[in-house]
Image (cartoon, grey):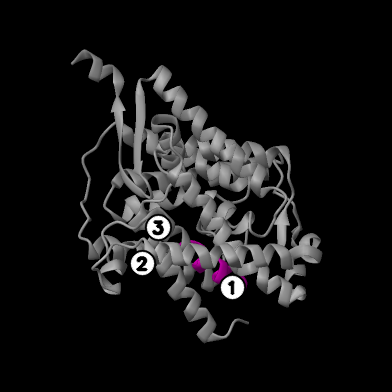
Amino acid sequence: MLPLIAFLFCVLLAGILGFAAHRASVCTVRAVAEYTHSGTGHMMFSIGKSALWVFAVTIPVFVLLPQTAASIGGWQLTGMAIIGGLLFGIGAAVNGACAYSTMARMVDGEIGMLLTVVGFVLGVGAFVVLLSGQVLARPASTPGMVPAILPYAWIIGAVLLAWAVYELLRLWRTRPKNRSLRQLAFAKQYRLSTAAMLIGLSSGTIFLLFGSPGYTTTLQQVIEGYLGTRDWPPHGRWIVLGAVLFGMLSSTWQRRSFRIDWRPRLSWIRNILGGVMMGFGTALLPGGNDALVLYGIPSMSPHALPAYLALVAGIAVALITMRAIFGVEMRVACRQDLYIADDSVDLAKREKR
């Protein structure tokens, strides 16, 4: 059992993770849209950095305590895992937000993102129905591949630590001048690299002390627990998930960005449909983009990297299709290491003007 002080530390880190993700507007859908629209990859690069920070925390521990690596599990790479990644990616693009971005926009007051969660519930429910009808099988667990790299993990760990020190120094030297630490901590917008550091360090430490608390998998387990097809998640996972949400809510409260958006609109249908695909994809994988980037890839689960690439491909295909058929384009702009803005443009209506 995790000591109370260590668990409370994980809760604090989960709050920091949520706060940083909200302040930088990190989102895989935005990352792909930035590339398809602007031709730049600043946000996708920052997502990759988040995974590197998790590696930088975990690999040295695995080198010093090899027995901890033996307990790291993963999921088998199957065709269903790839399909799950594609479905999640398509659903996220239709929804206009991935896992963390859905949470961040929901605490900002977007009712459409709350409907995405409703769709997510329906998607997991559809998986349960197909599971009970023996149409589908649950993803099969398998040992992670971390023990296989232990003979040369010290080299990887040394390189990652050197990179981490360089990145910390770079972030400090290039910080906005004439600002106190408090002003930097409560800046209205975080640099993508700063958010990647905070998210990765927090996730890696939580992973070592607590295990994988991916919120999409936690939500799936809650839904299945209610339906009686799976045990309820431990209370600790509920609390860690709540801390991530509290961190995001603290961010939106502190910078006063909460604006309730309750006016019905047709895009709500997209939110529900996107949520259904995201929920179904999460159950097939298992996990959403949060679990894949912050826990699956760093734990070297066989399914994680191929499934994430499929997820990115699903987002790209959906964005290109929506632009070509429906005339809707998601435009994202990042300047250097900072997310600027995005909007969804109806190209057909713009042409009529």
The vertical placement of 138 against 263, above or below, is below
Q: CA distance from mark 2 to mark 3?
A: 12 Å
Q: Residue furthest left?
A: 353
Q: Which mark is residue 246?
A: 2
Asked if the residue under mark 3 is in contact with the one under mark 2, i.e. CB atoms within 8 Å, the reply is: no
Front position in the image: 47 or 286: 47
Q: Which mark is residue 210?
A: 1
Q: Earlier in the sequence, mark 1 or mark 3?
A: 3
The amino acid type, in three-letter code, at marker 3 is Ala
- Mark 3 closeness class: few <14, some 14–19, many ≥20 residues within 10 Å: many
**Is 202 a magenta residue?**
yes
The answer to whether residue 45 is visible is yes
**Is 269 a magenta residue?**
no
Quadrant of the frame with the C terminus: top left
Is 36 on the left-hand or right-hand side of 287? left
The vertical placement of 337 against 348, above or below, is below
Front position in the image: 331 or 12: 331
Q: CA distance from mark 1 to mark 3?
A: 20 Å
Q: CA distance from mark 2 to mark 1?
A: 19 Å
Q: Position of residue 51 (x, y in %)?
A: 56, 56
- Secondary structure under tag 3 reads helix
Q: Quadrant of residue 150?
A: bottom right
- Where are the magenta residues, as a range? 198-211
Q: Which residue is mark 3?
A: 21
